Every structure is written in structure tokens, then in C-alpha cells.
Image (cartoon, rainbow, N blue to C red):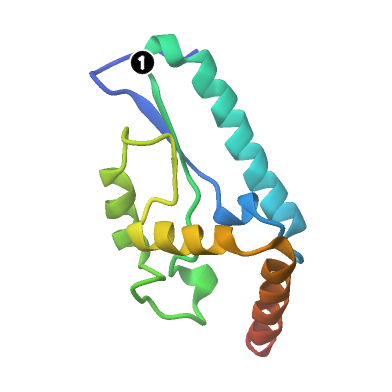
Amino acid sequence: MLTQKGSNPGIINIASYSALRTTPYLTVYSSTKAFIIQFFKCLSAEKYQKNVIIQILCPLTIYTSMTKHEKPSYFNPSAKLFVHSALNMYGVVQQTTGYILHEYKAYLFDLLPTSLWILLTYARVNARKKYV
């Protein structure tokens, strides 16, 4: 049971932008992230009267040890920069990418038809094969 302590209690969940789009070769990953989004949207509705903030982060690429073949950049922030940015969004919106440049990219990606998005995903997978 969630109990309210302090003025702005809450839960921050990390999902992924891949949960919001069709992502070949990331079927299980994107499906589990989609579950996180739905689960916490439902939990948020249950806890609405309790003033518990439930926020869902759906970032794009963040530079971590998992993405070591990419370097931090404006569009691929370090984990530290991402966390700082995401915490600034705490309580502002329920679902966000957590990083302003990811918001811009997500907006542009959302304009793409699914078929083109899938082709771009295939191209990215093929480009990464040299790192495996």
C-alpha cells in the first residue's frame, strides 16, 4: 500500500520510447516497457485521490555501458545529464521522454509512418552489427 509522506510523494518509472513504436528485433524489450507504461497509468488512476505523483519516463538513447559504441552527445545524453533533466520534469507531466532533445526527436519520429519507422529500425540494427 502506498502511503503519503511529505508534500510530493511519487514514483518515477523508466520505460522506453521503443514501447511506443513498432520495434523489430526488440519485441520482448519493447513489450515489457509497454507493460510498464500501462501498469503505471492504471496505478496512477488508482492513486489519483491520494495525491501520489506517478511519472513515466520514455527516453530514447542514453549513453550508458549498454550503448558504449555511441558517445554522449546532445541527442544521446550521459546518464547523469538525463537524470538531472528528468528530475526537473518531476510532477510536470505524467509521461515524458525526460530530456528536451528527446522530446523533439520523439515528436519528429511520431510524424513518420510506421512502415518508414520500421525501415529505419532495420537500418540501425544493420549498422550496429559491426559492434557485435
14 to 108, vertically: above or below: above
Residue at 52% across, 18% down = 45
Amino acid at dot 1 = Asn
Which residue is farthest top? Answer: 49
At 45% from the left and 68% from the top, the residue drawn is 64
- Mark 1 = which residue? 51
Secondary-structure class at tag 1 = loop
Number of numbered discs overlaid on the protein picture:
1
Instruction: Determine if residue 60 is in view.
Output: no
Q: Is residue 116 above or below residue 48?
A: below
The answer to whether residue 55 is left or right of residue 110 is left
Q: Position of residue 84 (x, y in %)?
A: 27, 53
Q: Which residue does the image show at 55% across and 28% down from the upper left?
A: 41
The x and y percentages for residue 121 are: 68, 72
Q: Nearer the viewer, residue 69 or 112?
A: 112
Above or below, comparing residue 22 to residue 130 in the picture: above
The quadrant where residue 99 appears = bottom left
Sort mark 1 into few (<14), some (14-19) or many (20+) by Cα contacts within 10 Å: few
When asked about the image quadrant of residue 22, the answer is bottom right
| Residue 49: percent from left, percent from top | 42, 9
Which image quarter holds the C terminus? bottom right
Residue at (64, 79) in percent of width and height: 124
**Residue 30, position in %: x, y?**
68, 53
Residue 65 visible in image: yes
